[in-house]
Amino acid sequence: MARIVMKFGGTSMAGIERIRAVAARIRREWAAGNQVAVVVSAMAGETDRLVGFCREASALYDAREYDVVVSAGEQVTSGLLAIALQAIGVPARSWLGWQLPIRTSDGHASARIADIETAGLLASMARGEVAVIPGFQGLASGERVTTLGRGGSDTSAVAMAAAMEADRCDIYTDVDGVYTTDPRIVPRARKLKKVTYEEMLELASVGAKVLQTRSVGLAMKEKVRVQVLSSFVDDDAPAADTLPGTMIVGEEEIEDMERQLITGIAHDKNEAKITLTSVPDKPGAVASIFAPLADANINVDMIVQNIAHSTGPTPSSTDVTFTVPSSDLAKSLDVLEKAKAEIEFAQIVHDTRVAKITVVGVGMRSHAGVASRMFTTLGQRGINILAITTSEIKVSVLIHEDETELAVRVLHTAYGLDAEDDGAA
Ligand code: ADP
Ligand code: ASP
Ligand code: MG
């Protein structure tokens, strides 16, 4: 007997028929004698709809009330799943975030889980009941409802698995594993049998939304065995512990022979590029730009500072380009305009039609030439690079948004990642 957490995403919960199929999957794990806790997302599209209502009600909405509204989608699916389970003879009940409770920080709309009270839940599971827990939600210190940031049900699932010392955390989604790149963009993407926590963390943080970044960080810290697999499989498919999904594992679990130079490629269209022109080339100039952005809690990602050119007797100046999340663009422009006198720039230019493409692989540590292959490949296709950043195991470039699919495809081929045939190898 094992104790397992099963998490089902939005497409897996989209409608009563899908919820019935999910219930049938859960029954198999439960009937095999396992203790089962299930974490669910809202129905696909529902959270977007609820966010839309908040924006419509007021552009400057109260984040505490936003959390009350957007957490509602998961309340609906958790209740419906408990009903569907009971209907097929599986004792089940829902446990809302405030009922357990799942304690979080006060950071509304992107709260962090601090602690989960599991005593009541474990007692119920020991009696053979399936626990159904809405993902994405928690409770802040002032007894206010919080949410964990978009895609946060993955983090709820991993946190539940850690808190109840589960043997496995199975993340069921609409693809059957983690691929070398988004299989919806590159049909020749290859499914990875295993991927290290570190690489998955990088892939998620640069746009591979198959897992929320925080969930991977938490799994790495708490050593939770996470598996990504499809909920869209036949009833007679093999049991989950033998299903060919993707295991997220420690680096020591990957054989040298399995190791590729590049593990995967991700893209992110949710960044905006800002350029400040003619910033004085003097000590403290860069700090005067990024300090007020940091104070406003805006995460700056890529930064490019051009080489300054002295123009005779006037002091030399330089352009500074950087990216911020698109959702923070308006706030960033406002902050920068207010700091204009101090920064002394000439103009602000911004562009949201950009995409960041990133190649990730721990093999890069010991191999030169990864970045240059990327630049050459993009250059040969006439794709212009607007900014570059690198770290020990990744290289990112910023390009025009329209060239995203082409760039991902040609890089996928250039790094030898294409599957033999279309689809999973
Ligand atoms: P869920 O609703 O189950 O949480 P998500 O939409 O959040 O599902 O995540 C699954 C999606 O992630 C897939 O449909 C796929 O398009 C996308 N995706 C992006 N990069 C990858 C990747 N490298 N491997 C697999 N899926 C990926
Ligand atoms: N329903 C939430 C979202 O769409 C959380 C999740 O599905 O993980 O972001
Ligand atoms: Mg998701």
Image: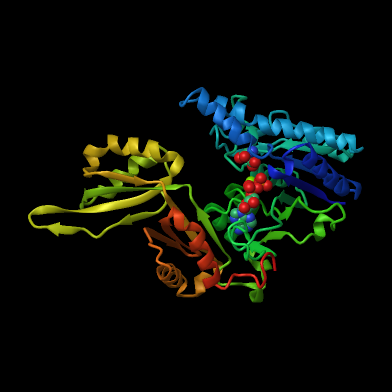
Q: Is residue 208 above or below residue 333?
A: below
Q: In this view, does 102 lie above or below 360?
A: above
| Residue 389 seen in the current view | yes
Query: Which image quadrant: the C terminus?
Result: bottom right
Instruction: Look at 48% across and 47% down and name the residue there.
Output: 270
Q: In this view, does 244 lie above or below 323?
A: below
Q: Position of residue 174 (x, y in %)?
A: 70, 50
Q: How many labels does the image show?
A: 0
Q: Position of residue 233 (x, y in %)?
A: 79, 53
Q: Position of residue 411 (x, y in %)?
A: 51, 67
Which sits in the foreground, 89 or 349?
Answer: 349
Q: In this view, does 30 lie to the left or right of 420?
A: right
- Picture quadrant where residue 336 is located: top left
Instruction: Look at 13% across and 52% down and name the residue there.
Output: 315
Instruction: Look at 60% across and 30% down and name the residue there.
Output: 50
Q: Residue furthest top?
A: 57
